[in-house]
Image: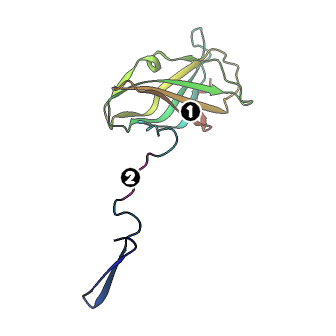
């Protein structure tokens, strides 16, 4: 029925409904087409760093003295698979130059979380700076490296410029 129109009408609850259907061309619907472009990658981690805590050494602290930086925020597995992740906490000086920091050992120990699992609070990722004369950083970056059960890997980065010095005055 090329180019024909089917019409139907009914009164329902005092309202007249009219149904129109127009058939054009062949009676078979067009086959679906695949979307163009690269496939969309679903990121299975939600991460945020709300604040960076900075703690300077006390005068009587044993050598080597260092400034400790600690991330505050959360990391959560929002995907449908188990995943393993490690973190890196990086800091940038007032002029944007990255500080040379040492990652705290616990950052490098893989942590495994099932769907919905995660961690939050302060100190889940920290680093040390052995140059105790540095200015307070302008920005901190948290890198979360992950591997899913199916072998998919990736990195999520979040950052903050909210830096709080929690050092105890001498």
* x then y, percent, for residue 87: 48, 24
User: Furthest-bottom residue in view?
Assistant: 14
* x then y, percent, for residue 72: 49, 34
* Res. 149 image quadrant: top left
Label number found at residue 31: 2
From the viewer's perspective, is the residue at label 1 or at label 2 nearer? 2
Q: Which residues are magenta?
A: 29-34
Q: Any magenta on residue 131?
A: no
Q: Main secondary structure of the magenta part?
A: loop
List the residue tagged with mark 1.
Answer: 52
User: Furthest-front residue in view?
Assistant: 2
Q: Residue at x 59, y 13 (%)?
A: 60
* x then y, percent, for residue 47: 47, 36
Label 1 close to label 2 by CB (< 8 Å): no
* In-front residue for pair 29/125: 29
Counting residues from the start of the chain, the first of labels 1 and 2 encountered is 2
């Amino acid at each position: 029925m090329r180019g024909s129109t089917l019409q139907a009408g009914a009164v329902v609850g005092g309202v007249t409904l009219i149904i129109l259907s127009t058939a054009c061309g062949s009676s078979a619907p067009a086959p679906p087409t695949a979307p163009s472009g690269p496939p969309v990658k679903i990121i299975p981690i939600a991460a945020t760093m709300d604040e960076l805590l900075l703690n300077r050494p006390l005068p009587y602290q044993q050598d080597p003295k260092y400034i400790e930086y600690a991330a505050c925020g959360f990391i959560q597995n929002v995907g449908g698979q188990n995943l393993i992740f490690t973190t890196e906490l990086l800091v940038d000086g007032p002029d944007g130059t990255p500080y040379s920091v040492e990652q705290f050992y616990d950052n490098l120990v893989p942590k495994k979380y099932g769907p919905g699992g995660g961690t939050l609070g302060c100190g889940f990722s920290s680093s040390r700076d052995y140059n105790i004369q540095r200015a307070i950083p302008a920005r901190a970056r948290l890198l979360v490296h992950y591997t899913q059960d199916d072998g998919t890997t990736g990195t999520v980065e979040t950052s903050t410029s909210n830096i709080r010095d929690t050092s105890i005055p001498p």
